[in-house]
Amino acid sequence: MKEAKAADEVLKGGEFLIKESQPESVFIPEDLDEEQQMVRQMVLDFVANDTRPNGQKIENQPELMKKAGELGLLGAHIPEELGGMNMDTNTVTLICESLGGSGGSFTTSFAAHTGIGMLPILYFGTPAQREKYLPKMSSGEWIGAYCLTEPGSGSDALAAKTRADLSEDGTHYVINGQKMWISNAGFSQVFVVFAQVDGDKFTGFIVDANAEGISLGAEEDKMGIKGSSTRQVFFENVKVPAENLLGELGKGHLIAFNVLNVGRFKLGIMTMGGCKFATKLSVNYANERIQFKEPIANFGAIKHKLAEQAIRTFVLESASYRLSDALQDRISTLKKEGMDYVESKLEAAEEYAIECAILKVVGSETLDFVVDELVQIHGGNGFSNEYPASMAYRDARINRIYEGTNEINRLLCVSMLLKRAMKGKIDLTSPAWAVQKELASMPKMETVSGEYGAEVKALKDFKKMALMVAGAAAKYQMDGKLNLKDEQEIIMNISDMIIDIYNMESVLLRIQRLKDHKNRKQAMEVYQAVLKTYFSDAQSRMVKNGTDALASFAQGDELKIMLMGIKRFAKYPPLNVKAARRLIAERLIAENDYCL
């Protein structure tokens, strides 16, 4: 396993927007060692033999979860003394990626249990609570569920109405209320429940799922993930021992929000595994399907689809392992400074909350794109339940909703960035002012030499563009001309610019590393085609989002000047994207697999 980097090599959360990373400072999936590759193969075997053929029925989930526990997958992130495997973050990422090809039903069961089911107890539980619950949850003997959402509180989780009242003798709380959309509810033994103590103190509890007064609604008839259990949970005078209060009274929001950071990260990873499998299915079908006396894989329109599936998946993978390694380095640094294992993991997830939100958005939307094209490549067969494309399409749609909707996560990207700046954790002001001075002085255009000089230069300028737009919006707000709370469209534009920057930098750093990497498997020209095509497309998105945002609040000469800035910071050489995509697609077609 890798050693931690020096603290000055690792950027803080959100700093990617204002600082540069060096290729040697990032981790790429090609760095996975022999032991990790063995773990990958073990998980892939489990997926092929167990979860993919059996994971589409609710009644099979408990047995599959138990087998996952026996393989050490449920406790991969749990300390050994609590029944886990204590694996590093990159290995846990590898496990989640490999499970991503299982299909949405099992991955939902797995993620709900190992993430929002177990992590609240790991992060916020007392030593006694951890010792009681986590070993059995790691083995799969007990399955967990997370009871947060209510009919009247979804994205606004703190508006929950479920109530908890302390008994007169102080020995227990009495919970009354209703929860909905609860994953794993039908076969769980442990509920993490959020309720308002005395009606106004949002608090977490560990609740025995079989306690008297708990009843379940019928299984929801969902669009997708039909093999996962999703039910309403009703609490009627449910007695919960006082020692089962989780964390601090009235601090349930800390549990809910911090656990969601990790949930978003893992969702992004699992969707990446799903993208790889769906792309493989696309290539397989395109090679097999004969029309006009030849495989449809020979047609340019199909090659475009296959290449774009692969490009977006490769970029997602690059961002995933970059973030995974940043989390691992932060954990290692904090442990060296004396912080314990649990606190270091919690703090690391909070540090990179912006990046976790980015990965959730990118992963869910990439998978949506990939499975949509999977259906299209299958044509009429893609609309038939006899083929896997239709199920993949239905299962993928939920990812943009749970773990915080993508709209909420986009808003969070910007709000968390501004909060970090206001708290002095990162310096956004100096770089933003530097961009304004550059616009005013119009200095000589900088040139960057080297094999990837065009991409390095474009990335620097794209960061300046984002800072210019965000800085202008912030200034208008300070001057009383704009209230960003009421201008979510502008925030979405800025967020999409930030997301594209993180993705572009992630794929650039990976490909710079791959040039001399011992585990390089494909010709560099294919990787370069991925890089340049993504930059070319991202350039158009950056210009569109920047222009739309500025035109939403600026006018007259100010708008003209800033639009000149957009033009100045949008330079990237024209690319024959048709040829680049064909090169990528032909590699996939020849290998009959996702092989990047």
Image: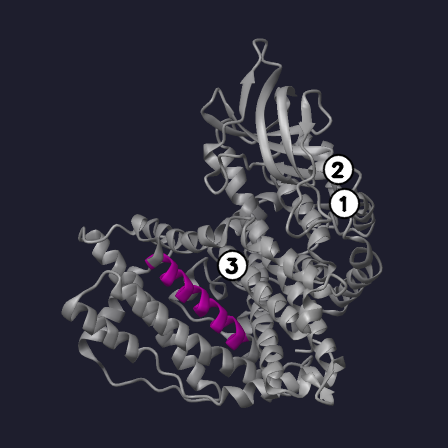
Of the 4 image quadrants, the one containing the N terminus is bottom right
Specify how the rendered protein is coloured: one colour
Label 1 near label 2: C-beta < 8 Å?
yes
Q: Mark 1 or mark 3: which is in front?
A: 1
- Distance from Cα at disc 3 to Cα at disc 2: 29 Å
> How crowded is the residue under tag 1: few (<14 C-alpha within 10 Å), some, or many (20+)?
many
Label 3 near label 1: C-beta < 8 Å?
no
- Distance from Cα at disc 2 to Cα at disc 1: 9 Å
The residue segment tinted magenta is 490-509
Q: Position of residue 123 (x, y in %)?
A: 60, 40
Left or right, 567 with reference to 306: left
> How crowded is the residue under tag 2: few (<14 C-alpha within 10 Å), some, or many (20+)?
some
Tag 2 residue: 187
> Foreground residue, 134 or 286?
286
Picture residue at 60% right of the left edge, 31% below the top: 193
Picture quadrant where residue 207 is located = top right
Q: What amino acid is found at the position of numbered circle 2 in the picture? A: Phe
Q: What amino acid is found at the position of numbered circle 1 in the picture? A: Ile
SS class of the residue under badge 3?
Answer: helix
Label located before the other in sequence (2 or 1): 1
Label located before the other in sequence (1 or 3): 1
Let me know if residue 522 appears in the view: no
> How crowded is the residue under tag 3: few (<14 C-alpha within 10 Å), some, or many (20+)?
many
Left or right, 76 with reference to 507: right
What label does residue 361 carry, if any?
A: 3
Tag 1 residue: 58
Q: What amino acid is found at the position of numbered circle 3 in the picture? A: Val
Picture residue at 74% right of the left edge, 77% below the top: 284
